[in-house]
């Protein structure tokens, strides 16, 4: 961070603190926008639309939250709009890690890691590799063997260059020493549509996003990148138990623009905590197959700070954009 940027950030934060009582007293004075950097129908969108009515309930005072999709390359449009929104508590949004972290390492962006007030992590969705049910590949070993025999001809869909699913796919490919052509999409839904239409040979997306379609027989899951199996999809195998030691996926949390008054951030944080403890929300989350992995504000910031440092090191050592 430059000295000028640091001073500007401190000034903005100071002004936010001074303005807190007046702003927070009448907040919210209009509907709150919850920004999503991906298309409707994906895991982040489903999480946001499941979360919003419960946050309204626990914020009280007639609070209203509208989910707004701003799909773009790897979520960048949504992340940028969240970072640049007025920090008055009327704009919040979903952050997908490592996606929002990797983009500023790859190229110049209109936001930085310091552009956000982190509220809480909600979901951690392990990456999974999936094929059409009519695919010749019945196992992950068969897919890898074909890819090695046909270097570069395997097509694998994923959500955006630098996204969590892109990095997970790269980690998998490095681990098994195979080459493939990666096809980026603006979100899970178009990625899945391409797989269902057999326009690509395989797709990587979160196991929670895959689960409803696996259960309905619309896609075949070949494995997912978690440390252990998931009760909601008991027949799905981890990559580890198939001899491929890779654990990777996407974290989805809630944030606000930097400089949002601390009292508002605290109210949002309490509403999230109450939502996660709400038995009705827990039922809805299970129905939507959300892979809940809550992290409160301080823990979430510490986790993301470490992840930011790790991504920076990986980018310097082996950049995935060449």
Image: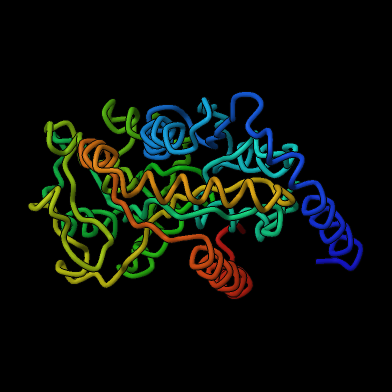
Examine the rendering and report whether any part of residue 188 can be seen.
no
x and y percentages locating residue 67 in the rendered image: 50, 28
Left/right placement of residue 249 relative to residue 197 reads: right
Query: Looking at the rendering, in which quadrant would you find the C terminus?
Result: bottom right
x and y percentages locating residue 74 in the rendered image: 54, 43
Q: Please, is residue 171 above or below residue 38 in the view?
A: below
x and y percentages locating residue 27 in the rendered image: 65, 34
Q: How is the image coloured?
A: rainbow
* Residue placed most toward the observer, 154 or 192: 192
Residue at left offset 64%, top offset 54%:
117
Left/right placement of residue 163 relative to residue 196 reads: right
Q: Please, is residue 165 above or below residue 191 in the view?
A: below
Which image quadrant is residue 53 in? top left
Residue at left offset 15%, top offset 47%:
137
Q: Please, is residue 244 above or below residue 46 in the view?
A: below
* Residue placed most toward the observer, 110 or 115: 115
Residue at left offset 12%, top offset 31%:
216
Examine the rendering and report whether any part of residue 71 can be seen.
yes
Which image quadrant is residue 5 in? bottom right
């Amino acid at each position: 961070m430059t000295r000028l940027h640091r001073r500007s950030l401190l000034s903005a934060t100071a002004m936010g603190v001074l303005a807190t009582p007046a702003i927070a007293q009448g907040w919210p004075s209009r509907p709150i926008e919850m920004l999503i950097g991906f298309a409707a129908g994906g895991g982040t969108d489903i999480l946001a639309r499941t979360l919003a009515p419960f946050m309204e309930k626990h914020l009280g005072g007639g609070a209203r939250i509208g989910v707004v999709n701003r799909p773009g390359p790897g979520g960048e449009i949504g992340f940028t709009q969240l970072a640049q929104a007025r920090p008055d508590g009327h704009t919040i949004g979903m952050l997908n890690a490592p996606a929002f972290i990797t983009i500023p390492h790859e190229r110049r962006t209109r936001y930085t890691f310091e552009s956000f007030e982190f509220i809480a992590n909600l979901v951690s969705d392990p990456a999974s590799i999936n094929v059409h049910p009519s695919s010749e590949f019945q196992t992950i070993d068969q897919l890898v063997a074909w890819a090695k025999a046909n270097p570069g001809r395997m097509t694998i869909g994923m959500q955006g260059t630098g996204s969590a699913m892109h990095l997970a796919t790269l980690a998998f490919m490095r681990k098994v020493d195979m080459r493939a052509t990666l096809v980026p999409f603006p979100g899970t839904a178009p990625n899945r549509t391409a797989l269902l239409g057999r326009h690509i040979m395989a797709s990587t997306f979160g196991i929670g996003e895959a689960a409803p379609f696996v259960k309905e027989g619309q896609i075949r899951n070949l494995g997912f990148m978690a440390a252990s199996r998931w009760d909601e999809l008991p027949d799905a195998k981890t990559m580890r138990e198939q001899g491929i030691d890779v654990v990777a996926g996407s974290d989805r949390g809630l944030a606000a623009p930097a400089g949002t008054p601390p009292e508002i951030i605290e109210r949002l944080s309490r509403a999230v905590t109450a939502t996660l403890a709400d038995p009705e929300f827990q039922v809805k989350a299970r129905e939507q197959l959300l892979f809940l992995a809550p992290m409160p504000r301080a823990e979430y910031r510490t986790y993301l700070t470490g992840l930011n440092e790790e991504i920076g090191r990986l980018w310097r050592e082996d950049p995935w954009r060449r």
